Structures are given as structure tokens and as C-alpha cells.
Image: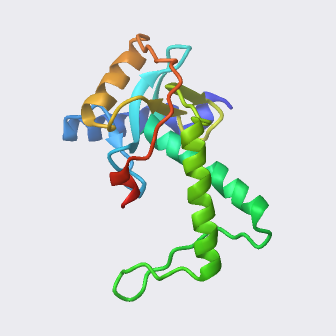
Amino acid sequence: MKAQENKGYDPQVIAEYKKQMEATGLRYVIEQEDDDNNEEYQHFYFIGKDDDGKELVYDAVMYTLRMQHESELFEIAEHKAAQHFPDYKKIAYEEDENGDLSTLDSRQEEIGLYMAEVILELEEEEAVKVSEHVDMDKHVDFGIALDIGLHVEAVTREVIEKFIDDFNNDNLQLDDTLYSFQTTEEEADH
């Protein structure tokens, strides 16, 4: 894809992002439309340069390794549930008029318990391991996409700012240690 077709390279677009950053005093802009943003996951944009030294907007998602680990465990559990239960459908939680989650039918409950058992088994065996990474996708419509997994407790302003500094100064050092996480009793109760 040519840089001219990609709006993330457009000087006017870059200037708009810089203006937003200046207004907030941050070196990045949070994607407000992303409902998934939380203390373990942030979708944001920042200004940097590509391999050719051209300025652009990076479209980044950053998350904790714990969140990635939980997500991978859940995907495996869903896959195993689909194999085990021929009538498997993703469990869709619905809210009643008070905002409370409606109760699951007996089949959904059985599938949910099966998935929980699979996850616990995978955790005990430490079957899923994750490590810090930055995956880059240059074949997108806007800027360059970054998928960032870091071994941090939370994705904070400081973590994002340090990442941007290290990334833009070509000083990023990722930990290649493989990590596995256990669900604590406190987390399991929520």
C-alpha cells in the first residue's frame, strides 16, 4: 500500500493528532470509540516515523500479558467446548430490564462449567505461555497498526509514555520470558 493512500501519513491528519495531544498534554490520543479500554487494555494513537523516516500516526493497542493469557485460555476452552458439545453456541449473556444478567439455561450452564474446568486444567498444566511482543501491520488503511503485549500490572499513562519513548528512540527492549498466569480466588469470585 502506498503511503499516499494511507491517511495515517497525511500531514493534515498528523497535525490534527498533534493538536489533540497538545490540548491534553499527552503524547498520545486514546481511541474514545473503543469500549474495551480499561486498566489492562488501551487503544491509542501516537506520532512516530516509519522505516523510511516518514512521519505517521501509529494505531496501537496495548494490553497486559495477563489479559492476553486469559484471552488465549478462553479461546482454547471455547474450541474444546465446540468439540465436546455438538450443539455449542457462544454463551450470550442478556440483561433484564434492571440491568441484571439473565440466568443461563441448564445446557448453557453445563457448557460454562465445562469451559471453566478446561481453563483450570490448562492453568494447572501451564499449557499456555505468553511473552512480551510488538506485532506490526503495515497493510492497514490508517498509519501502521501495533499490537503490543507487555508484562505490566496495568496499562497506565506512564507505561504508554515509556513505550512511545522507547519505540520512537529505537530503544525498545522486550522481555522474551514465557509467562503463565493463575486465576486467583479473588478473580474467580467476580
Q: Quadrant of residue 84?
A: bottom right
Quarter of the picture holding the C terminus: bottom left
- Image coords of residue 103 (percent x, y): 49, 82
**Eyeballing the image, is 122 above or below 178?**
below
Is residue 166 visible in the rendered image? The answer is: yes
Q: Residue furthest bottom?
A: 97
Q: Which one is in front, 19 or 97?
A: 97
Q: Which one is in front, 174 or 136?
A: 174
**Eyeballing the image, is 41 above or below 188?**
above
Count of marks, rendered view: 0
| Residue sitting at x 44%, y 81% | 95
Q: Quadrant of residue 47?
A: top left
* Colour pattern of the rendering: rainbow
As drawn, is 29 to the left or to the right of 55? left
- Image coords of residue 21 (percent x, y): 27, 37
Quarter of the picture holding the N terminus: top right
| Residue sitting at x 38%, y 12% | 169
Q: Which one is in front, 93 or 123?
A: 123
As drawn, is 64 to the left or to the right of 1? left
